[in-house]
Image (cartoon, rainbow, N blue to C red):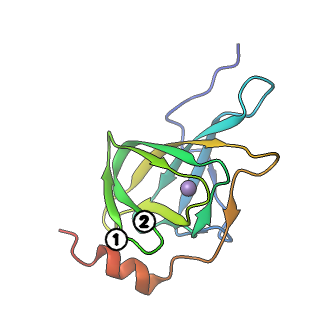
């Protein structure tokens, strides 16, 4: 049996795909039985993913703090500890922390062939500020 530490912060995520300080702790790797990964992703305040899509969707389980989930063309949704977000396949979206607090989610991400995610452009500071401007 392989043991992983669910609350470890993990490794810094690349600036090519994330804005700000974000970290990944890969908990469950893909194997012959599980055609997905489970990773704990920690976003410091203001950190977020680039826009991206998943060919077979994704599930987010928020375990700490609060942040946002936004699908292209829709209003951003506030998300918080305890929330479960089901993301359909091929929907352009981003997720990340609030401007003032960190956010940690587990991400369950399926594979289609060898692809889990297609990375797109960053969420600009201007667009992020529009989302977070009414934060208390
Ligand atoms: Mn995603």
**Whether label 2 touches label 1, CB < 8 Å:** yes
Question: What residue lies at 34% left-to-right and 69% top-to-bottom?
Answer: 99
> Up-down: is 105 above or below 131?
above
> Up-down: is 43 above or below 16?
above
Q: In which quarter of the image is residue 92?
A: bottom right
> Up-down: is 128 above or below 66?
below
Q: In which quarter of the image is ligand 1?
A: bottom right
Q: Residue furthest top?
A: 1
Q: Mark 1 points at which residue?
A: 75
Q: Nearer the viewer, residue 81 or 54?
A: 54
Q: Which of 116 and 98 is in front in this view?
A: 116
Quadrant in which the C terminus is drawn: bottom left
The crowding category of the residue bearing disc 2, from other C-alpha atoms within 10 Å (few below 14, some 14 to 19, many at least 20), is some
Q: Residue furthest bottom?
A: 126
The Cα–Cα distance between marks 2 and 1, rounded to whole angstroms, is: 6 Å
| Spot occupied by residue 63 in the image (x, y as percentages of width and height) | 39, 40
Question: What residue lies at 57% left-to-right and 29% top-to-bottom?
Answer: 5
Q: What element carries label 2?
A: strand
Question: What residue lies at 49% left-to-right and 65% top-to-bottom?
Answer: 48
Q: What element carries label 1?
A: loop
| Spot occupied by residue 46 in the image (x, y as percentages of width and height) | 42, 69
Q: Name the residue under label 2.
A: 70
């Amino acid at each position: 049996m392989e043991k992983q530490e669910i609350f470890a912060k993990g490794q810094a995520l690349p600036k090519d795909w994330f804005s700000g300080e974000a970290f990944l702790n890969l908990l469950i790797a893909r194997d012959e039985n599980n055609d997905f990964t489970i990773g704990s992703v920690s976003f410091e305040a203001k950190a977020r993913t680039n826009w991206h899509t998943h060919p077979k969707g994704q599930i987010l389980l928020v375990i700490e703090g609060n942040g946002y989930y936004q699908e292209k063309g829709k209003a951003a949704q506030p998300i918080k500890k305890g929330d479960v977000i089901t993301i359909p396949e091929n929907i352009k979206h981003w997720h990340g922390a609030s401007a003032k607090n960190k956010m940690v989610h587990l991400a369950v991400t399926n594979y289609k062939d060898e692809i889990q995610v297609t990375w797109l452009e960053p969420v600009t500071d201007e667009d992020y500020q529009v989302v977070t401007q009414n934060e208390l």
